[in-house]
Image (cartoon, coloured by chain):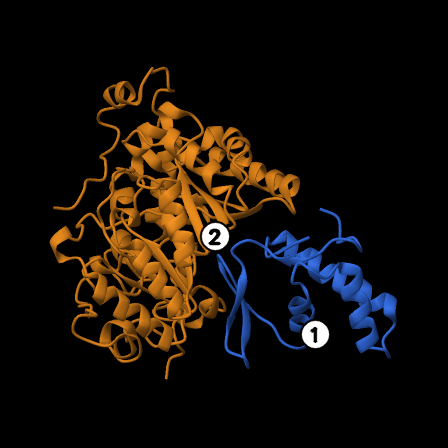
Amino acid sequence: MSSNPLALIAEITHRCPLHCVYCSNPMQLAPTASELSTGEWKDVLEQCGKLGMLHAHFTGGEPLARTDLAELVSAARAAGLYTNLITSGIGLNEPRLETLVAAGLDHIQISFQDSHDVSANWIAGAKAHAHKIELARTIGRHRIAFTVNLVVHRQNLDYLDEMIAFIEQLNPDRIEIAHTQYYGWALANRAALMPTLAQVERAVGIVAAAEKRLVGRIRIDSVVPDYYAKFPKACMGGWGRKLLLINPSGKVLPCHAAEVLPGLSFENVRENSLHWIWHESPSFRRFRGEDWMPDPCRSCERRSEDFGGCRCQAFLLAGDSMATDPACSLAPAHDLVQAVVGAADSQVSAPASAAGSFVQLQKLNQDLWIYRTSPE
Amino acid sequence: MPPPSDTSAPRLAAGCRWGGTEQDRVILYPEGAIKLQGTGRQVLECCDGTRTFGEIIQELQKEFGKTDPEKIRADISIFLEQLQRRRIVDY
């Protein structure tokens, strides 16, 4: 029998006041009316505890858009789970933070889009930056783990050193510097977000220097740009090996993007137990282990490290969910990734921010990208 | 950050705490969990923010009387420094 999952990614809603162009939520967002109720989520969290899971990551959309968040955090703690809130911070003030901490919130992760107000709001498609700074200072007054997450891409990578210096003075325990992952909205905006090789190489040096300088004060975690890597990422630590995601409507997925895969249907916590879904359901067994693997994966030494890479990326880029992840330099379809990267090198970046407001900047770059919308 | 000084009082950092079961005790932290057994577990159980590093060392040197006391000090110091870098321990 497969071993138990370690962590739950709870996408408790797809509603979000931000419209980030790099959002990896599916383009088909879960309608508000379909969201699991408080009681249904509490039942799910209890099942997670019984499965021996350790972490619950509350995310979305914007998890703060649910007024019952503190109740869910408290239910997760009661089930023995470590609780993590992944948020834009919009909808959070000090009294609500105090309520969440009292409910047992262990860790809060806030995203920043840039260090400059105008460009940060431009990327988020909303006026959010100033509030995030205010909130970061509020968090500093509470005993809770604090991470700042920074999603990087073509439009902000040139300012990475400035962004790190800016985040440093917000005093987080951790900074996560994450290259954009190309799923959902981010994939639709890939041409505008894909960094150049020069940007990626420069960023490696900047991150290494920051790690050295901040050692013992702030821990830096990096998510590498897999289009530029030699080998694919071990997506989710392998299909159905460590993590499960429950979307706002109760669908249980092995990863954020799996719903795009053709020929697979995913179970719902409204109809089946999490135990059965994880261990027995056809969708979770589909790419578990090595039997499904194509060449060159099935004889590759790295197959137990990266598990053939990402199934969704294989489908989204190569049109075949069984293929080796095209991000792998050994993949038959690797030329598809090389073409994207090559095109990034020959494109001109968007005009630098000379605008006085993010709305003005949006007008100047109207056709550059689409903004993530909100669900019905 | 230098290694812990004798007067510092090591403790689990904000947002890091014990979890798991009595047989399988783990330290839970934002990105994951560390399973702790034997001496590692014993050391971290002493790091309650009230005992000083000096006191913890003395206690464990007494308990492991046969081992070179300086080696005990050096090992525990490195152990805590590594966890401090991962923001799991404060001192």
The answer to which quarter of the image holds residue A273 is bottom left
The chain letter for the residue carrying disc 1 is B
Does residue A281 lie above or below A336 as drawn?
Answer: below
In this figure, which residue is indicated by the disc labeled 2? A230
Instruction: Work out whether residue B25 or residue B10 is closer to the camera in this orientation and state it.
Output: B10
Disc 1 crowd rating (10 Å Cα; few below 14, some 14-19, many 20+) is: few
Q: Chain of mark 2?
A: A
Q: Are marks 2 and 1 in contact (CB under 8 Å)?
A: no
How many numbered marks, from 0 up? 2
Residue at 86%, 69% in the rendered image: B69
* Residue A32 sits above or below residue A21 on the image: below
As displayed, is residue A280 above or below residue A368?
below
Q: Position of residue B41 (x, y in %)?
A: 64, 72
Task: Name the residue furthest bottom.
Answer: A1
Tell me if A241 is positioned left or right of A267 in this view. Answer: right
Name the spot of residue A158 as percent of width and height, x first: 47, 29
Q: Is residue B60 visible?
A: yes
Name the kind of residue labelled 1 in the image.
Thr
Q: Residue at x 63, y 41 (%)?
A: A214
The chain shown in orange is which? A
> In which quarter of the view is residue A53 placed?
bottom left
Residue shown at 30% from the left, 75% from the top: A278
Name the tint of chain B in the rendering.
Answer: blue
Q: Report the front residue among B57 and A251.
A: B57
Helix, strand or loop at mark 2: loop
Screen quadrant of the N terminus of chain A: bottom left
Write the residue at 51% across / 41% down. A140
The one nearer the camera, A38 or A8, is: A38
- The residue to which callout 1 is attached is B39
